[in-house]
């Protein structure tokens, strides 16, 4: 005779299959959690960094691997965000000799008593007027934002015909943990820190967002469009996922 406890356990066992199975795709390992109540697949990045793949019972391993591959960039981004949140980033002091990135290269800071602009990059050095040192961060962000806008617009002209798009324009601002986004009215938005990345990586961020003008989601059609415009996009995407968090803030 079944007790009420037995009935509850039987019901739970029918609804869920415990996450004893795992699946490995390159350097990513997922615990698989199957549920008869689930109709779609979903990836969760736990607070600990553990990767969980929830799926219906009937979904096979090949389908799971394909789904992971489609979501790989998202997974790397989420893992990077968690690592960044847990890591203490040294604050810039804006003193002479301190290094600041621009298109992947470090340039030392020089403090001068007099110059006609607040901040400039000349002869491989950032040069800051000393009376503006107290709010140097705001001046750097303003400088980076303007250079990013100009640089991205120039690269956009190289790709918009090739990728058959007509963006409304480029806007540069603080996007939090996102490198870029495609907004309403065909506007392309980019984080001002994009200009700190190596040029080939910043160019990938641009192409990624341009492709979203055609395909709003990261479907196979989206990645095919990116690949047509940038055949080595996978290597650039992998670099960004692995090293993007190492780009210094200011």
Image: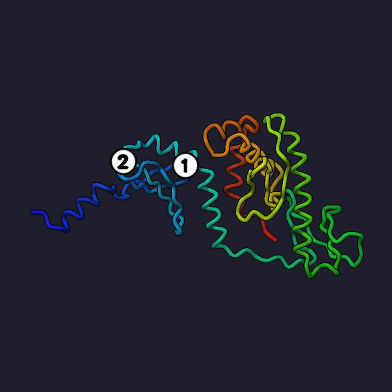
Quadrant occupied by the C terminus: bottom right
Place of residue 30 in the rendered image (x, y in percent of width and height, measured from the top left): 41, 47
As rendered, which of 215 and 156 lies closer to the eye?
215
Place of residue 215 in the rendered image (x, y in percent of width and height, measured from the top left): 58, 35
Q: Is mark 2 on a helix, strand or loop?
A: loop
- What crowding class fits label 2: few (fewer than 14 Cα within 10 Å), some (14-19), or many (20 or more)? some
Q: On the rendered structure, is 38 left or right of 116?
A: left
Quadrant occupied by the N terminus: bottom left
Q: Tell me which residue sits at (78%, 67%) in the image.
A: 135
As rendered, which of 86 and 220 lies closer to the eye?
220
As rendered, which of 31 and 159 lies closer to the eye?
159
- Disc on res. 26: 1
Earlier in the chain: of badge 1 and badge 2, it is: 1
Place of residue 177 in the rendered image (x, y in percent of width and height, measured from the top left): 60, 54
The Cα–Cα distance between marks 1 and 2, rounded to whole angstroms, is 23 Å
Front label number (1 vs 2):
2
Question: Circle 2 is placed at which residue position?
Answer: 57
Q: Tell me which residue sits at (64%, 33%) in the image.
A: 230
């Amino acid at each position: 005779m079944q007790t009420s406890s037995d009935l509850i356990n039987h019901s739970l066992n029918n609804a869920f299959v415990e996450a004893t199975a795992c699946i490995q795709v390159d350097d990513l390992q997922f615990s698989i959690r199957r549920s008869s109540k689930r109709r779609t697949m979903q990836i969760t990045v736990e607070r600990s960094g553990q990767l969980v793949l929830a799926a219906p019972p009937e979904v096979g391993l090949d389908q799971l691997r394909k789904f992971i591959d489609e979501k790989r960039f998202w997974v790397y981004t989420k893992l990077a965000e968690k690592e960044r949140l847990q890591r203490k980033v040294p604050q810039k002091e804006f003193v002479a000799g301190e290094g600041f990135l621009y298109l992947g290269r470090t340039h030392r800071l020089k403090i001068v008593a007099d110059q006609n602009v607040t901040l400039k990059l000349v002869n491989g050095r950032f040069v800051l007027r000393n009376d503006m040192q107290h709010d140097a961060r705001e001046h750097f962000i303003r400088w980076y934002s303007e250079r990013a806008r100009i640089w991205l617009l120039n690269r956009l002209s190289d790709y918009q015909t090739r990728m058959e798009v007509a963006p409304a324009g480029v806007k540069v601002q603080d996007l939090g943990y996102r490198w870029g986004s495609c907004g309403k009215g065909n506007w392309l938005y980019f984080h001002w820190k994009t200009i700190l990345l190596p040029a080939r990586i910043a160019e990938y961020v641009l192409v990624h967002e341009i492709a979203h003008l055609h395909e709003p989601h990261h479907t196979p059609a989206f990645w095919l469009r990116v690949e047509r415009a940038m055949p080595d996009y996978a290597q650039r995407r992998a670099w960004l996922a692995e090293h993007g968090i190492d780009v210094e803030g200011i």
